[in-house]
Image (cartoon, coloured by chain):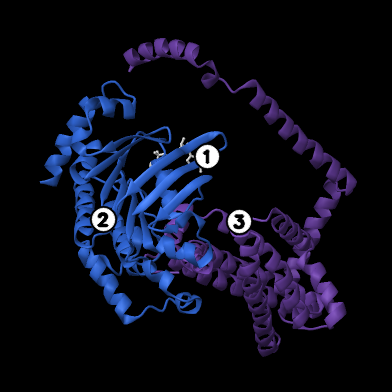
């Protein structure tokens, strides 16, 4: 052990002369590190000051929170269980239809916005900017607008999900279409296959698994979003939740929250299994 | 008869293929040799019309292939099957579907969108897979196969096109010697039995010598040698590969491959 240490010391001096940068954190990197850390500290202080948060408010806030948590127990449905289940179903349906139509619209738009499908720079830039603008407006804002136009009800929620999912998925799809393995495309092209056939036989097998796994993830997050949309009057479990919060019926609020958590967890597990079956399964042929 | 007249393809200022003139009679087995970057792949992609020549003409008998557009262009690609170094199969589709892709040109959009192939076509595909000895892998997904097996699937796909010409771009460069010999044997047998012209770029000088009746040497986009394997002297090889002791390594290589072929 000691012997090797001696040899190592010689080696160290020798190698340090060869590549000195390998033995120290470079000056530049140290400077970036300093800037990042001090930036975070400064922003934290400014934010706390701006929002007038001090140890007292935090202390009282936590106290109130615990008070409320105590009021949550025991969670009960108070005889509303069938209404809750029906409303949960409505929320799931809203999320499902929103995701499904978002996906169906996003596939063709994704292909149109992919440079290797439509080489026109103008179409590419216009579509991408368009997606960005739509994505830039939160689903909740879209829902508020649709509630104004189409009235209260699930339709406004579904529309809001379709709009934002179409734009977000189309952007993701376009990117995965642009990143396909071109050798597989060349292979299909070399047989004399036409453009649509090339898309079906060489693009779809490569991008469909990525698309589906994205869509499953979006469905999951849309169930959460749809629960919130209910609060804006789009119906579903969110509406029930909001009613209970207004009359401060905390045990029923808690019951509904637990219902939402369980539903999301179940969907999460199922979609994880489906994703595994798609991506890692040699039997799967897109 | 395939004829190239002054065909040039440039990337920026570089002429990857530089005023190439070439006649290949129908049914010949031709090997293209040359060091990396000599323009072999570019030349083959120009012939299949995966890439457009910048100038010059490609003729097939009386027809100007380089002027084909639309349906004619797709027909030409289908008549001029291509095999690639990296196999270029669709990895997530089954071996059978990949082979059936050789028939896409004969299909309308709707039948091919539904992946609807006739019984006759399926029988043809199985026959083609049998021809290259991997009928037992027909239902596997392509990414489950070894490189040698994938290259044989690619040959089966080419056979399904019932082509006039088979172009092969370094078909054995990614393969072990046994698989390489199997692939070259299959190409030779297709050349002899079906009478398809075979044009293959081959890195290994020894395989080119062993399998091809005619060898074309390329260097910097130009044809610098065109003759029979026996006319390919050490001086010529040296000039094509611009390496001084090339022949030593290459002759050694030849012995290895000869062993593998037996
Ligand atoms: N897509 C491309 N863009 C730019 N240059 C290319 C491209 N393809 C090939 N080249 C260049 O053309 C020359 C010939 O390449 P290639 O035909 O692939 O040679 P080979 O197949 O003989 O190794 C090389 O110098 C290569 O760098
Ligand atoms: Mg090459």
Q: Is residue B1 left or right of residue A143?
A: left
Give the residue displayed 55% in from the left and 19% down from the top. A21
Give the residue displayed 27% in from the left and 29% down from the top. B237
N-terminal of the two: label 1 or label 2? Answer: 1
Residue for badge 2:
B27
Give the residue displayed 22% in from the left and 45% down from the top. B212
Chain of the residue on which disc 2 is drawn: B
* Vertical position of residue A247 compared to residue B150: above or below: below
* Cα distance between the residues tagged 2 and 3: 44 Å
Residue found farthest to the front: B62
Tell me what hue chain A is rendered in: purple
Whether tag 3 and tag 1 are in contact, CB under 8 A, the answer is no
* Cα distance between the residues tagged 1 and 2: 29 Å
Tell which tag, 3 or 1, sits nearer the viewer.
1
Residue for badge 3:
A175
Residue for badge 1:
B10
Label 3: element kind: helix
Give the residue displayed 35% in from the left and 67% down from the top. B94
* Cα distance between the residues tagged 3 and 1: 29 Å
């Amino acid at each position: 052990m000691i012997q090797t240490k001696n040899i190592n010391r010689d080696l160290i001096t020798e190698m340090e002369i060869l590549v000195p940068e390998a033995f120290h954190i470079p000056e530049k990197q140290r400077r970036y590190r300093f800037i990042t850390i001090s930036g975070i500290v400064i922003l934290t202080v400014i934010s706390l000051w701006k929002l007038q948060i001090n140890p007292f408010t935090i202390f009282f806030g936590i106290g109130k929170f615990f008070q409320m948590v105590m009021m949550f127990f025991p969670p009960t449905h108070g005889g509303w269980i069938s209404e809750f289940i029906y409303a949960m179903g409505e929320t799931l349906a809203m999320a499902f239809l929103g995701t499904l139509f978002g996906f169906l619209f996003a596939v063709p738009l994704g292909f149109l916005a992919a440079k290797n499908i439509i080489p026109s720079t103008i179409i590419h830039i216009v579509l991408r900017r368009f997606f960005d603008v739509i994505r830039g407006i939160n689903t909740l804002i879209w829902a508020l607008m649709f509630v104004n136009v189409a009235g209260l009800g699930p339709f406004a929620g579904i529309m809001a999900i379709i709009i934002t999912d179409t734009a977000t998925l189309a952007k993701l799809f376009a990117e995965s279409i642009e990143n396909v393995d071109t050798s597989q495309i060349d292979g299909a092209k070399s047989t004399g296959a036409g453009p649509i056939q090339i898309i079906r036989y060489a693009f779809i097998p490569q991008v469909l698994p990525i698309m589906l796994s994205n869509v499953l993830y979006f469905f999951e997050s849309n169930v959460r979003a749809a629960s919130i949309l209910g609060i804006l009057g789009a119906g579903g479990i969110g509406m029930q939740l909001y009613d209970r919060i207004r009359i401060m019926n905390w045990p029923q609020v808690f019951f509904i929250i637990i219902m939402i958590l369980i539903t999301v967890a179940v969907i999460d597990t199922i979609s994880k299994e489906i994703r595994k079956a798609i991506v890692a399964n040699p039997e799967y042929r897109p | 008869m395939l004829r190239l007249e002054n065909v040039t393809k440039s990337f920026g200022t570089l002429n990857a293929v530089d005023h190439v003139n070439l006649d290949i009679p129908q049914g010949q087995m031709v090997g293209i040799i040359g060091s990396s970057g000599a323009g072999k792949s570019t030349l083959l992609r120009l012939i299949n019309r995966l890439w457009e020549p910048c100038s010059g003409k490609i003729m097939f008998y009386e027809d100007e292939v380089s002027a084909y557009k639309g349906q004619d262009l797709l027909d030409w690609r289908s008549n001029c099957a291509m095999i690639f170094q990296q196999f270029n199969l669709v990895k997530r589709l089954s071996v059978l579907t990949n082979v059936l892709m050789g028939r896409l040109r004969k299909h309308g959009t709707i039948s091919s969108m539904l992946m609807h192939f006739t019984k006759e076509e399926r029988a043809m595909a199985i026959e083609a897979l049998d021809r290259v000895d991997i009928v037992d892998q027909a239902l596997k997904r392509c990414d489950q196969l070894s490189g040698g097996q994938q290259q044989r699937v690619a040959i089966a796909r080419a056979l399904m096109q019932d082509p006039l010409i088979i172009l092969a771009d370094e078909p054995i460069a990614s393969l072990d010697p046994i698989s390489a010999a199997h692939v070259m044997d299959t190409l030779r047998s297709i050349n002899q039995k079906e009478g398809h012209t075979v044009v293959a770029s081959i890195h290994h000088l020894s395989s080119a010598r062993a399998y091809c009746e005619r060898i074309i040497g390329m260097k910097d986009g130009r044809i610098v040698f065109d003759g029979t394997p026996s006319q390919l002297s050490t001086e010529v090889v040296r000039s094509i590969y611009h390496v001084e002791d090339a022949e030593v390594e290459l002759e050694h290589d030849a012995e290895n491959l000869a062993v593998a072929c037996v």
